[in-house]
Image (cartoon, rainbow, N blue to C red):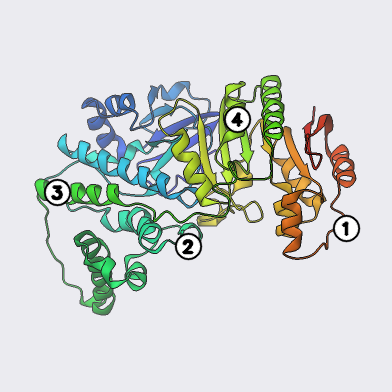
Amino acid sequence: MFNPGSFRDPAGRIIENDGRVYRLIFEAGAQSFAKATDAGIFARYAASGMMLPAQEVALDALPFDTFGAKQAIEHPRIPFFSYPYEWCFSQLKAAALLHLDLQLNLLSEDFTLSDATAYNIQFIGTRPVFIDHLSVIPYRPGMLWSGQRQFAMQFLNPLLMWSKLSVAPNAWFRGGLEGIPPEDMNRILRLRDKLSFTVAAHVVAQAKVHASAIQRGARNAKGVSASLSKSRFAAILQALRVFVAKLELEGDKSVWSNYADDNSYEVAERTEKQSFVAEFAKSTQPALLFDLGCNTGDYSLEALNAGAGSVIGFDFDYGAIEKAFARFKGSDHSFTPLWLDAANPSPSLGWAERERQGFADRAHPDALIALALVHHIAITRNVPLDMVLDWLVSIAPAGIIEFPNKDDEMVQTLLSQRGDIFPGYSLEAFLGLMAERARIVRTQTLSGGTRTLLWYDQA
């Protein structure tokens, strides 16, 4: 019943019940929550879009054990819960700026945040939103920034890897859920990168403090009474905000980021695919649709315009995700692009392997579209076709799967890099395997003759 990722906070826990999301508030968090509520913090920041809305509910009206909670609130359900190691650079940057803006605004009202974890931010469409109301606590004069190291590990250092070193940090972040430590970042940054005051203060200095603490040892450590003025606290946050806002990618083109505009499709084939997707979305009206291999979001947009409620797009290529995020940023479309290696999706991680849920545990869409994807998994990653289809059909009860045969230009390119060792890869095999797994509603061979679209359902 408890959300497995909410156990660390003694102030409260998340409970999911019958599709609804509640937050129980325990004694440890009741006073801070009441003060923030009385100050109008949650109502104002929800209205501004910075925080997830919260509605107080009566404890005795809840259909489950409340475990001695003092209060309960209900949150609207987010279409899909994602993690920082599934975001592109621009998403992580947007989340970092939201955190800093929220901190600065709260500080001006004599409140602050108890931590600085990136896991407290989710995306609704392309808009980041803060979700942990119990992290808001009253500010006490002289308070240090308790989240400084955490902000560096989960926001600043991954952004520096991307911006300064042109290295995507996602695999590293996924392997170390607490983020990238300053002492590791200090080792890999170039000297010229360390000349920045912000990097020197939040990476180099933090690494030295950590090393000194280890060398000194807990038994020899002397108690130090330190304080930070409110104006200095705000100045640190503001300087970080200016620095993060200026971070940019170097602009190297990725393999597939231009695929939507530069590929073997003729205009007629694209139009046929758009019409097929639109008809599917109009017919099925999925509240949540996955677009696997979304590229820059062309077909996600078709699905949304035809009636899909929300679309989560997944792609292996960071450049494509960046373009998709920029394309939909600021729009009213409920589209969120995320990074996914389909042959190695995010696993269940953290405490008891349940704290961060794997892709399969979070994947419950009403429908999916998988265009220009099957051949990359089956040929590039050597996954047998029947296993590819098992995986796709297990994700959603209805969908569209595109199958390019061996005469297709892209398939020929993939085969030229390794030879044809795939005797079971054929249109006949694809159709037969799909017929064993679902009802085939409709198929359409595109006008180029090398690609077939298949609409399935499991009704």
Check disc 3 and give the amino acid type: Ala
Earlier in the chain: of badge 4 and badge 3, it is: 3
- Residue depicted at x 25% and y 36%: 32
**Separation (CA) of disc 2 from disc 3:** 30 Å
- Give how far across and how far down residue 175 sits, in percent: 50, 62
**In this figure, which residue is indicated by the disc labeled 4?**
288
SS of the residue under disc 3: helix
Is 140 displayed left or right of 257 in the figure? left
**In this figure, which residue is indicated by the disc labeled 1?**
423
Check disc 4 and give the amino acid type: Leu
Q: In this view of the protein, which residue sits in the foreground, 23 or 162?
A: 162
- Give how far across and how far down residue 422 sits, in percent: 83, 59
Can you tell which mark lies on residue 235?
3
SS of the residue under disc 1: loop
- Give how far across and how far down residue 400 sits, in percent: 73, 34
Earlier in the chain: of badge 2 and badge 3, it is: 2
**In this figure, which residue is indicated by the disc labeled 2?**
172
Crowd band around label 3 with a 10 angstrom C-alpha radius: few (<14), some (14–19), many (20+): few
Crowd band around label 2 with a 10 angstrom C-alpha radius: few (<14), some (14–19), many (20+): few
